[in-house]
Image (cartoon, rainbow, N blue to C red):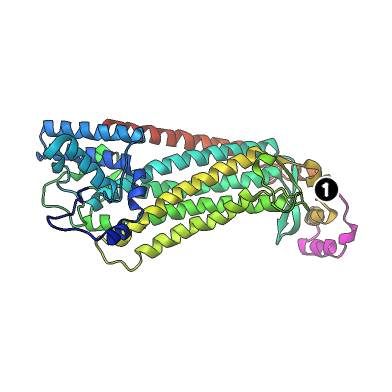
Amino acid sequence: MTKLWQKKGTSLDKDIEAFEVGDDYMLDIHLAPFDLYGSSAHARMLNKIGILSHSELDSIIKGLKEIMKSIENNTFQITIADEDVHTRVENILIEQIGDVGKKLHAARSRNDQVLVDTRLYVKYEIINNMKFLLEFCTLLNNFAKKYEFIPMPGYTHMQLAMPSSIGMWASSFVENIIEELKIFESVFDLNDMNPLGSGAAYGVSLDIDRNHTTELLGFNRTQKNSLYCGNSRGKIEAHVLNSLSGFGLIFNRIAADLLFFTTNELNFFKISDSITTGSSIMPQKKNLDVMELIRGRTHVLLGYESQMKNLIANLPSGYNKDYQETKRLLINGFSLLQQIINVTSIVFLHLEPIEDNLKKAHSPEIYATDAAYRMVREGTPFRDAYREIGNNLDALKLEDPVKNIKSKTHIGSTGNLQLNNYDDEIRKYVTKWTKIEDDYRTILEKLL
Protein backbone atom coordinates (compact mmCIF):
# COMPACT_ATOMS: atom_id res chain seq x y z
CA MET A 1 0.00 0.00 0.00
CA THR A 2 1.43 3.38 -1.05
CA LYS A 3 2.11 5.77 1.83
CA LEU A 4 1.34 9.45 1.36
CA TRP A 5 4.89 10.46 2.23
CA GLN A 6 6.72 7.69 0.34
CA LYS A 7 9.22 8.61 -2.39
CA LYS A 8 10.62 6.51 -5.20
CA GLY A 9 13.13 3.92 -4.04
CA THR A 10 12.42 4.31 -0.32
CA SER A 11 11.51 1.41 1.94
CA LEU A 12 10.77 1.48 5.65
CA ASP A 13 12.13 -1.21 7.97
CA LYS A 14 9.23 -3.45 9.06
CA ASP A 15 10.02 -3.24 12.77
CA ILE A 16 10.30 0.53 12.54
CA GLU A 17 7.00 0.60 10.64
CA ALA A 18 5.26 -1.52 13.29
CA PHE A 19 6.56 0.70 16.09
CA GLU A 20 5.75 3.93 14.25
CA VAL A 21 2.20 2.94 13.39
CA GLY A 22 1.43 1.07 16.63
CA ASP A 23 -2.33 0.63 17.03
CA ASP A 24 -3.05 4.00 15.44
CA TYR A 25 -4.50 2.44 12.30
CA MET A 26 -6.96 0.40 14.39
CA LEU A 27 -8.06 3.44 16.40
CA ASP A 28 -8.66 5.34 13.16
CA ILE A 29 -11.79 3.31 12.46
CA HIS A 30 -13.47 5.61 15.02
CA LEU A 31 -12.42 8.64 12.97
CA ALA A 32 -13.17 7.18 9.53
CA PRO A 33 -16.62 8.75 8.96
CA PHE A 34 -15.33 12.13 10.07
CA ASP A 35 -12.37 11.90 7.71
CA LEU A 36 -14.87 11.53 4.87
CA TYR A 37 -16.89 14.54 6.04
CA GLY A 38 -13.71 16.60 6.29
CA SER A 39 -12.63 15.46 2.84
CA SER A 40 -16.02 16.39 1.39
CA ALA A 41 -15.83 19.90 2.82
CA HIS A 42 -12.23 20.30 1.66
CA ALA A 43 -13.11 19.13 -1.87
CA ARG A 44 -16.00 21.59 -2.05
CA MET A 45 -13.67 24.39 -0.95
CA LEU A 46 -11.09 23.39 -3.60
CA ASN A 47 -13.86 23.54 -6.17
CA LYS A 48 -14.84 27.01 -4.94
CA ILE A 49 -11.29 28.36 -5.43
CA GLY A 50 -10.86 26.66 -8.83
CA ILE A 51 -8.51 23.78 -7.96
CA LEU A 52 -11.19 21.19 -8.71
CA SER A 53 -13.66 21.34 -11.58
CA HIS A 54 -17.34 20.59 -10.99
CA SER A 55 -16.99 17.17 -12.61
CA GLU A 56 -13.91 16.37 -10.53
CA LEU A 57 -15.77 17.39 -7.38
CA ASP A 58 -18.68 15.15 -8.37
CA SER A 59 -16.30 12.21 -8.85
CA ILE A 60 -14.68 12.74 -5.45
CA ILE A 61 -18.01 13.09 -3.62
CA LYS A 62 -19.30 9.96 -5.33
CA GLY A 63 -16.16 8.10 -4.29
CA LEU A 64 -16.44 9.32 -0.69
CA LYS A 65 -20.07 8.17 -0.59
CA GLU A 66 -19.01 4.70 -1.69
CA ILE A 67 -16.41 4.55 1.06
CA MET A 68 -19.04 5.69 3.59
CA LYS A 69 -21.24 2.78 2.51
CA SER A 70 -18.38 0.39 3.28
CA ILE A 71 -18.01 1.93 6.73
CA GLU A 72 -21.72 1.56 7.39
CA ASN A 73 -21.58 -2.05 6.17
CA ASN A 74 -18.52 -2.78 8.37
CA THR A 75 -16.44 -3.77 5.35
CA PHE A 76 -14.07 -0.81 5.51
CA GLN A 77 -10.66 -1.88 6.76
CA ILE A 78 -7.41 -0.13 7.58
CA THR A 79 -4.18 -2.14 7.69
CA ILE A 80 -0.82 -1.40 9.23
CA ALA A 81 0.52 -0.83 5.72
CA ASP A 82 -2.00 2.03 5.30
CA GLU A 83 -0.70 3.68 8.48
CA ASP A 84 -3.90 5.63 8.99
CA VAL A 85 -7.41 6.33 7.72
CA HIS A 86 -6.24 9.32 5.64
CA THR A 87 -3.92 7.18 3.54
CA ARG A 88 -6.52 4.45 3.19
CA VAL A 89 -9.22 6.84 1.97
CA GLU A 90 -6.92 8.55 -0.52
CA ASN A 91 -5.66 5.26 -1.95
CA ILE A 92 -9.21 3.93 -2.35
CA LEU A 93 -10.25 7.13 -4.11
CA ILE A 94 -7.32 6.88 -6.52
CA GLU A 95 -8.23 3.25 -7.24
CA GLN A 96 -11.86 4.23 -7.85
CA ILE A 97 -11.61 7.50 -9.78
CA GLY A 98 -7.99 7.67 -10.95
CA ASP A 99 -5.81 10.79 -10.95
CA VAL A 100 -8.67 13.00 -9.75
CA GLY A 101 -8.24 11.35 -6.37
CA LYS A 102 -4.67 12.66 -6.23
CA LYS A 103 -5.93 16.25 -6.29
CA LEU A 104 -7.81 16.02 -2.99
CA HIS A 105 -4.73 16.42 -0.80
CA ALA A 106 -3.90 19.85 -2.22
CA ALA A 107 -3.76 22.50 0.53
CA ARG A 108 -3.88 20.11 3.48
CA SER A 109 -1.66 17.73 5.43
CA ARG A 110 -2.37 14.60 7.42
CA ASN A 111 -1.95 16.75 10.51
CA ASP A 112 -4.72 18.93 9.11
CA GLN A 113 -6.90 15.89 8.65
CA VAL A 114 -6.39 14.33 12.06
CA LEU A 115 -7.10 17.71 13.68
CA VAL A 116 -10.41 18.19 11.90
CA ASP A 117 -11.37 14.52 12.24
CA THR A 118 -10.77 14.68 15.98
CA ARG A 119 -12.74 17.92 16.39
CA LEU A 120 -15.71 16.42 14.53
CA TYR A 121 -15.41 13.18 16.53
CA VAL A 122 -15.31 15.06 19.84
CA LYS A 123 -18.46 17.00 18.89
CA TYR A 124 -20.20 13.73 18.08
CA GLU A 125 -19.09 12.02 21.30
CA ILE A 126 -19.93 14.96 23.57
CA ILE A 127 -23.42 15.04 22.07
CA ASN A 128 -23.75 11.28 22.67
CA ASN A 129 -22.43 11.41 26.22
CA MET A 130 -24.62 14.42 26.99
CA LYS A 131 -27.61 12.32 25.97
CA PHE A 132 -26.53 9.36 28.15
CA LEU A 133 -25.88 11.63 31.14
CA LEU A 134 -29.27 13.31 30.86
CA GLU A 135 -31.00 9.94 30.60
CA PHE A 136 -29.17 8.83 33.74
CA CYS A 137 -30.17 12.05 35.53
CA THR A 138 -33.82 11.34 34.70
CA LEU A 139 -33.50 7.77 35.98
CA LEU A 140 -31.78 8.89 39.17
CA ASN A 141 -34.23 11.72 39.87
CA ASN A 142 -37.14 9.32 39.39
CA PHE A 143 -35.43 7.03 41.90
CA ALA A 144 -35.12 9.98 44.31
CA LYS A 145 -38.80 10.89 43.89
CA LYS A 146 -39.95 7.29 44.35
CA TYR A 147 -38.10 6.95 47.66
CA GLU A 148 -38.01 10.63 48.63
CA PHE A 149 -39.18 10.19 52.22
CA ILE A 150 -37.52 6.92 53.09
CA PRO A 151 -35.09 7.88 55.87
CA MET A 152 -31.40 7.13 55.54
CA PRO A 153 -28.68 7.83 58.11
CA GLY A 154 -26.31 10.60 57.14
CA TYR A 155 -22.60 10.06 57.83
CA THR A 156 -19.57 12.25 58.43
CA HIS A 157 -16.14 10.76 59.08
CA MET A 158 -17.85 7.39 58.36
CA GLN A 159 -19.79 7.80 61.64
CA LEU A 160 -23.50 8.42 62.25
CA ALA A 161 -24.19 12.13 61.87
CA MET A 162 -27.77 13.31 61.19
CA PRO A 163 -30.94 11.97 59.58
CA SER A 164 -30.93 12.04 55.79
CA SER A 165 -33.07 10.34 53.15
CA ILE A 166 -32.88 8.28 49.99
CA GLY A 167 -34.25 11.33 48.16
CA MET A 168 -31.48 13.59 49.45
CA TRP A 169 -28.75 11.05 48.73
CA ALA A 170 -29.84 10.23 45.16
CA SER A 171 -30.72 13.78 44.11
CA SER A 172 -27.36 15.10 45.35
CA PHE A 173 -25.80 13.27 42.42
CA VAL A 174 -28.44 14.61 40.03
CA GLU A 175 -27.52 18.18 40.95
CA ASN A 176 -23.81 17.34 40.80
CA ILE A 177 -24.13 16.02 37.24
CA ILE A 178 -26.23 18.99 36.14
CA GLU A 179 -23.54 21.36 37.45
CA GLU A 180 -20.83 19.34 35.72
CA LEU A 181 -22.74 19.61 32.43
CA LYS A 182 -21.88 23.31 32.39
CA ILE A 183 -18.21 22.40 32.16
CA PHE A 184 -19.01 19.83 29.47
CA GLU A 185 -20.75 22.55 27.46
CA SER A 186 -17.76 24.87 27.75
CA VAL A 187 -15.48 22.09 26.51
CA PHE A 188 -17.86 21.53 23.59
CA ASP A 189 -17.58 25.23 22.73
CA LEU A 190 -13.78 25.17 23.05
CA ASN A 191 -13.55 22.24 20.66
CA ASP A 192 -16.06 23.74 18.19
CA MET A 193 -13.54 25.48 15.93
CA ASN A 194 -12.20 24.54 12.52
CA PRO A 195 -8.46 23.81 12.16
CA LEU A 196 -8.73 22.68 8.53
CA GLY A 197 -6.43 24.66 6.26
CA SER A 198 -3.62 25.05 8.76
CA GLY A 199 -1.54 22.53 6.80
CA ALA A 200 1.42 21.15 8.69
CA ALA A 201 0.97 24.06 11.15
CA TYR A 202 2.26 26.85 8.89
CA GLY A 203 -0.57 27.35 6.42
CA VAL A 204 -0.37 26.83 2.64
CA SER A 205 0.54 29.02 -0.33
CA LEU A 206 -2.83 28.55 -2.06
CA ASP A 207 -5.54 31.14 -1.47
CA ILE A 208 -7.90 28.79 0.35
CA ASP A 209 -11.20 29.78 1.95
CA ARG A 210 -11.06 28.44 5.49
CA ASN A 211 -14.30 30.12 6.54
CA HIS A 212 -16.09 28.17 3.80
CA THR A 213 -15.04 24.82 5.26
CA THR A 214 -15.98 26.11 8.71
CA GLU A 215 -19.50 26.74 7.45
CA LEU A 216 -19.71 23.45 5.57
CA LEU A 217 -18.58 21.43 8.61
CA GLY A 218 -20.85 23.27 11.01
CA PHE A 219 -18.11 24.60 13.26
CA ASN A 220 -18.88 27.66 15.35
CA ARG A 221 -15.73 29.49 14.24
CA THR A 222 -12.43 29.17 12.38
CA GLN A 223 -9.35 28.54 14.48
CA LYS A 224 -7.20 31.35 13.13
CA ASN A 225 -3.49 30.95 13.78
CA SER A 226 -2.19 27.99 11.79
CA LEU A 227 0.57 27.24 14.27
CA TYR A 228 -1.84 27.31 17.19
CA CYS A 229 -4.06 24.83 15.31
CA GLY A 230 -1.25 22.30 15.56
CA ASN A 231 -0.17 23.31 19.04
CA SER A 232 -3.71 22.93 20.36
CA ARG A 233 -3.67 19.22 19.62
CA GLY A 234 -3.62 17.42 22.93
CA LYS A 235 -4.53 20.57 24.82
CA ILE A 236 -8.18 20.47 23.82
CA GLU A 237 -8.23 16.69 24.30
CA ALA A 238 -6.87 17.25 27.84
CA HIS A 239 -9.76 19.59 28.58
CA VAL A 240 -12.18 16.98 27.26
CA LEU A 241 -10.67 14.28 29.47
CA ASN A 242 -10.73 16.64 32.44
CA SER A 243 -14.49 16.98 31.98
CA LEU A 244 -14.94 13.22 31.51
CA SER A 245 -12.94 12.69 34.70
CA GLY A 246 -15.24 15.11 36.52
CA PHE A 247 -18.19 12.89 35.68
CA GLY A 248 -16.13 9.83 36.55
CA LEU A 249 -15.55 11.17 40.06
CA ILE A 250 -19.32 11.52 40.55
CA PHE A 251 -19.89 7.89 39.59
CA ASN A 252 -16.92 6.90 41.73
CA ARG A 253 -18.65 8.37 44.80
CA ILE A 254 -21.93 6.66 43.91
CA ALA A 255 -20.00 3.40 43.73
CA ALA A 256 -18.23 3.97 47.06
CA ASP A 257 -21.54 4.78 48.75
CA LEU A 258 -23.33 1.73 47.38
CA LEU A 259 -20.51 -0.58 48.40
CA PHE A 260 -20.77 0.81 51.93
CA PHE A 261 -24.55 0.79 52.09
CA THR A 262 -24.83 -2.80 50.81
CA THR A 263 -22.46 -4.37 53.33
CA ASN A 264 -24.01 -7.08 55.50
CA GLU A 265 -23.56 -4.80 58.50
CA LEU A 266 -25.76 -2.05 57.02
CA ASN A 267 -27.80 -3.87 54.37
CA PHE A 268 -29.67 -0.73 53.30
CA PHE A 269 -30.48 -1.95 49.80
CA LYS A 270 -31.77 -5.15 48.27
CA ILE A 271 -29.72 -5.95 45.21
CA SER A 272 -30.69 -8.27 42.39
CA ASP A 273 -28.66 -11.39 41.67
CA SER A 274 -28.45 -10.19 38.07
CA ILE A 275 -25.98 -7.44 39.03
CA THR A 276 -23.84 -9.37 41.52
CA THR A 277 -21.20 -12.05 41.25
CA GLY A 278 -20.04 -14.82 43.59
CA SER A 279 -16.84 -16.29 44.93
CA SER A 280 -15.01 -19.34 43.65
CA ILE A 281 -14.39 -20.50 47.23
CA MET A 282 -17.03 -18.90 49.50
CA PRO A 283 -20.54 -20.14 48.62
CA GLN A 284 -22.35 -17.35 50.49
CA LYS A 285 -20.74 -14.41 48.66
CA LYS A 286 -22.88 -11.96 46.73
CA ASN A 287 -20.58 -9.24 45.46
CA LEU A 288 -21.57 -5.90 43.96
CA ASP A 289 -18.17 -5.81 42.33
CA VAL A 290 -19.42 -3.86 39.32
CA MET A 291 -19.23 -0.87 41.69
CA GLU A 292 -15.68 -1.81 42.65
CA LEU A 293 -14.76 -1.76 38.98
CA ILE A 294 -16.36 1.67 38.54
CA ARG A 295 -14.41 2.86 41.55
CA GLY A 296 -11.20 1.48 40.04
CA ARG A 297 -11.82 2.51 36.44
CA THR A 298 -12.44 6.09 37.49
CA HIS A 299 -8.74 6.14 38.29
CA VAL A 300 -8.02 4.77 34.83
CA LEU A 301 -10.02 7.70 33.45
CA LEU A 302 -8.07 10.12 35.64
CA GLY A 303 -4.93 8.46 34.31
CA TYR A 304 -5.93 9.22 30.72
CA GLU A 305 -6.13 12.91 31.58
CA SER A 306 -2.77 12.81 33.32
CA GLN A 307 -1.14 10.94 30.43
CA MET A 308 -2.55 13.43 27.94
CA LYS A 309 -1.06 16.39 29.81
CA ASN A 310 2.26 14.62 30.22
CA LEU A 311 2.39 13.80 26.51
CA ILE A 312 2.08 17.43 25.43
CA ALA A 313 4.37 18.87 28.11
CA ASN A 314 7.79 20.11 26.89
CA LEU A 315 6.92 19.78 23.20
CA PRO A 316 8.29 22.47 20.87
CA SER A 317 5.86 24.32 18.58
CA GLY A 318 4.87 22.53 15.40
CA TYR A 319 3.93 18.94 14.75
CA ASN A 320 5.55 16.24 16.88
CA LYS A 321 4.99 12.51 16.48
CA ASP A 322 4.22 12.35 20.21
CA TYR A 323 0.74 13.62 19.32
CA GLN A 324 -0.09 10.23 17.84
CA GLU A 325 -0.34 8.82 21.38
CA THR A 326 -3.12 11.27 22.30
CA LYS A 327 -5.70 9.57 20.09
CA ARG A 328 -5.96 6.37 22.13
CA LEU A 329 -6.48 8.25 25.40
CA LEU A 330 -9.31 10.35 23.99
CA ILE A 331 -11.17 7.46 22.35
CA ASN A 332 -10.76 5.22 25.41
CA GLY A 333 -11.92 8.04 27.68
CA PHE A 334 -15.23 8.49 25.87
CA SER A 335 -15.77 4.75 25.70
CA LEU A 336 -15.05 4.21 29.39
CA LEU A 337 -17.42 6.94 30.58
CA GLN A 338 -20.22 5.51 28.43
CA GLN A 339 -19.66 2.08 29.97
CA ILE A 340 -19.72 3.55 33.49
CA ILE A 341 -22.98 5.43 32.83
CA ASN A 342 -24.57 2.33 31.33
CA VAL A 343 -23.74 -0.12 34.12
CA THR A 344 -24.62 2.38 36.87
CA SER A 345 -28.03 2.86 35.22
CA ILE A 346 -28.54 -0.91 35.25
CA VAL A 347 -27.62 -1.07 38.94
CA PHE A 348 -30.21 1.57 39.88
CA LEU A 349 -32.87 -0.34 37.95
CA HIS A 350 -32.14 -3.33 40.21
CA LEU A 351 -31.78 -1.45 43.50
CA GLU A 352 -34.47 -1.33 46.20
CA PRO A 353 -34.20 0.29 49.63
CA ILE A 354 -34.81 -1.98 52.66
CA GLU A 355 -36.91 0.48 54.65
CA ASP A 356 -36.87 -1.40 57.96
CA ASN A 357 -33.08 -1.56 58.04
CA LEU A 358 -32.79 2.10 57.12
CA LYS A 359 -35.13 3.10 59.95
CA LYS A 360 -33.45 0.82 62.51
CA ALA A 361 -30.10 2.44 61.72
CA HIS A 362 -31.41 5.69 63.23
CA SER A 363 -30.22 5.20 66.83
CA PRO A 364 -30.96 7.93 69.41
CA GLU A 365 -27.65 9.79 69.03
CA ILE A 366 -28.40 10.60 65.39
CA TYR A 367 -31.01 13.08 66.69
CA ALA A 368 -28.53 14.93 68.92
CA THR A 369 -28.16 17.95 66.65
CA ASP A 370 -31.93 18.21 66.21
CA ALA A 371 -32.33 18.14 70.00
CA ALA A 372 -29.87 21.02 70.28
CA TYR A 373 -31.79 23.02 67.68
CA ARG A 374 -35.02 22.49 69.62
CA MET A 375 -33.33 24.17 72.58
CA VAL A 376 -32.18 27.00 70.28
CA ARG A 377 -35.78 27.59 69.18
CA GLU A 378 -36.67 27.98 72.85
CA GLY A 379 -34.00 30.67 73.29
CA THR A 380 -30.93 28.77 74.45
CA PRO A 381 -27.65 29.94 72.82
CA PHE A 382 -26.47 27.24 70.41
CA ARG A 383 -23.14 26.67 72.16
CA ASP A 384 -24.91 26.10 75.49
CA ALA A 385 -27.41 23.77 73.85
CA TYR A 386 -24.57 21.89 72.15
CA ARG A 387 -22.84 21.27 75.50
CA GLU A 388 -26.05 20.35 77.27
CA ILE A 389 -26.96 17.70 74.70
CA GLY A 390 -23.35 16.50 74.39
CA ASN A 391 -23.11 15.94 78.12
CA ASN A 392 -26.38 14.01 78.24
CA LEU A 393 -26.36 11.81 75.17
CA ASP A 394 -27.75 8.89 77.14
CA ALA A 395 -30.94 10.90 77.66
CA LEU A 396 -31.69 11.08 73.93
CA LYS A 397 -34.70 9.11 72.75
CA LEU A 398 -35.69 7.47 69.51
CA GLU A 399 -37.77 9.60 67.18
CA ASP A 400 -39.87 8.88 64.12
CA PRO A 401 -37.27 9.23 61.34
CA VAL A 402 -39.88 9.88 58.64
CA LYS A 403 -41.49 12.65 60.69
CA ASN A 404 -38.02 14.04 61.36
CA ILE A 405 -36.94 14.32 57.72
CA LYS A 406 -40.29 15.76 56.64
CA SER A 407 -40.10 18.45 59.33
CA LYS A 408 -37.07 20.13 57.74
CA THR A 409 -38.41 22.56 55.17
CA HIS A 410 -35.68 24.96 54.08
CA ILE A 411 -34.59 24.69 50.43
CA GLY A 412 -32.50 21.59 49.86
CA SER A 413 -33.37 19.91 53.15
CA THR A 414 -34.95 16.47 53.37
CA GLY A 415 -38.46 17.92 53.53
CA ASN A 416 -37.98 20.33 50.62
CA LEU A 417 -35.70 18.80 48.01
CA GLN A 418 -37.59 20.42 45.11
CA LEU A 419 -36.99 17.43 42.89
CA ASN A 420 -39.32 18.74 40.16
CA ASN A 421 -36.86 21.59 39.61
CA TYR A 422 -34.28 19.04 38.50
CA ASP A 423 -36.79 17.67 35.99
CA ASP A 424 -37.20 21.18 34.60
CA GLU A 425 -33.43 21.64 34.26
CA ILE A 426 -33.03 18.24 32.62
CA ARG A 427 -35.79 19.04 30.11
CA LYS A 428 -34.09 22.32 29.17
CA TYR A 429 -30.84 20.49 28.54
CA VAL A 430 -32.59 17.78 26.53
CA THR A 431 -34.33 20.37 24.34
CA LYS A 432 -31.11 22.29 23.76
CA TRP A 433 -28.95 19.27 22.99
CA THR A 434 -31.55 17.56 20.83
CA LYS A 435 -31.44 20.63 18.58
CA ILE A 436 -27.63 20.63 18.60
CA GLU A 437 -27.67 16.93 17.64
CA ASP A 438 -30.24 17.46 14.87
CA ASP A 439 -28.34 20.43 13.45
CA TYR A 440 -25.06 18.52 13.51
CA ARG A 441 -26.58 15.48 11.81
CA THR A 442 -28.10 17.73 9.12
CA ILE A 443 -24.73 19.36 8.47
CA LEU A 444 -23.00 16.01 8.07
CA GLU A 445 -25.74 14.57 5.86
CA LYS A 446 -25.42 17.52 3.50
CA LEU A 447 -21.72 16.78 3.07
CA LEU A 448 -22.35 13.19 1.98
According to the picture, the residue beneath numbered tag 1 turns out to be 360
Position of residue 387 measured from the top left corner of the image (x, y, whole percent): 82, 65
Q: Which residues are magenta?
A: 380-398
Judging depth in this view, the residue of 199 and 145 nearest the camera is: 199
Crowd band around label 1 with a 10 angstrom C-alpha radius: few (<14), some (14–19), many (20+): some
182 to the left or right of 383: left
| Image quadrant in which you'd find residue 315 | bottom left
Looking at the rendered structure, the kind of residue marked 1 is Lys
59 to the left or right of 421: left
| Image quadrant in which you'd find residue 160 | bottom right
Position of residue 81 measured from the top left corner of the image (x, y, whole percent): 27, 50
Query: Measuring 68% from the left and 35% from the top, which residue is drawn there?
Result: 146
Q: In this view of the protein, can residue 237 be seen by the observer? A: yes
Q: Is residue 161 magenta?
A: no
Position of residue 377 measured from the top left corner of the image (x, y, whole percent): 79, 52
Query: Measuring 27% from the left and 35% from the top, which residue is drawn there?
Result: 67
Looking at the rendered structure, the secondary structure element under dot 1 is helix
